[in-house]
Amino acid sequence: CGKSTVAKLLLALERPDAGDVIFDGVSLNALTGRALRLVRKDIQAVFQNPASSLNSRLPIWRSIVEPFDNFQSHDLSEFAGRGQSRRDTAAKLLEMVGLERTLGDRYPHELSGGQRQRVAIARAILLKPRLLICDEPTSSLDITVQSQILNLLKQLRQELGMSCLFISHDIAVIQRMCSRILVMKEGRIMDRFPVDQLCSEERHPYTRQLVSAFMRE
């Protein structure tokens, strides 16, 4: 229904056919080159399939710090302390997402799905983005691991002071993670409201239909 397309538009990976994408008062449509790259530093993403997000030929620590290749002026000491290497930065980020430092020398195929998603999160927060887009980040994980990843995202959101755009078809997950909800159908926003008004009688018929289907599951 266009949810993932919205994520790509916000990341400036695609351009809208009409209208504009505004971030912090700046039109992303009008940006190119270095200006666009600087805005992208503030908007990072975690996608559904971490296996496809990580380079299978790179050790985990190198995948985590890969964004530095595009932002060499960014201070490497943000997470690891002044004078420390990229490898030290990766190790610190691994700890922040609940993984052992020693996993940095492994490769993606040697990690579980949940571990790979934690690595993807570590890479996404490397540049301390202001907005983290989470596109179905737990839908491919089992229930227990889902809960752990959601708790981690909530913790990091609070610690780093970043906003999160959480894209999901799972109403329970949305209720747990979000303060406001936008409901989309066929690429259009049908409804928007605070999360505590999800079951209000004022909701759009399509929203009520989704809630009803969820309650029957």
Image (cartoon, helix red, strand yellow):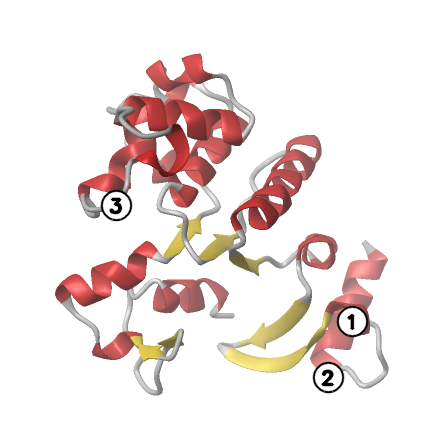
Q: Which quarter of the picture shows residue 13?
A: bottom left
Q: Earlier in the sequence, mark 2 or mark 3?
A: 3
Residue beneath the point at 51% across and 31% down: 96
Residue 204's disc is 2
Indicate the secondary structure of the residue bearing disc 2: loop
Q: Earlier in the sequence, mark 1 or mark 2?
A: 1
Categorize mark 3 by other alpha carbons within 10 Å: few (<14), some (14-19), many (20+).
Answer: few
Residue that numbered label 3 is attached to: 74
Q: Which quarter of the picture shows residue 50?
A: top left
Q: Give left or right: position of 2 versus 190.
A: left
Indicate the amino acid at tag 3: His
Above or below 83: residue 71: below
Categorize mark 1 by other alpha carbons within 10 Å: few (<14), some (14-19), many (20+).
Answer: some
Residue that numbered label 1 is attached to: 198
Mark 1 or mark 3: which is in front? 3
Indicate the amino acid at tag 2: His
Q: Give left or right: position of 90 versus 214.
A: left
Residue 159's disc is none
* In front of the other: 185 or 56: 56
Residue 204 location (% of width, % of height)? 73, 84
The residue furthest front is: 82
Categorize mark 2 by other alpha carbons within 10 Å: few (<14), some (14-19), many (20+).
Answer: few
How far separated are the C-alphas under marks 2 and 3?
45 Å
Residue 132 location (% of width, % of height)? 47, 54
Residue 118 location (% of width, % of height)? 50, 33
Indicate the amino acid at tag 1: Leu
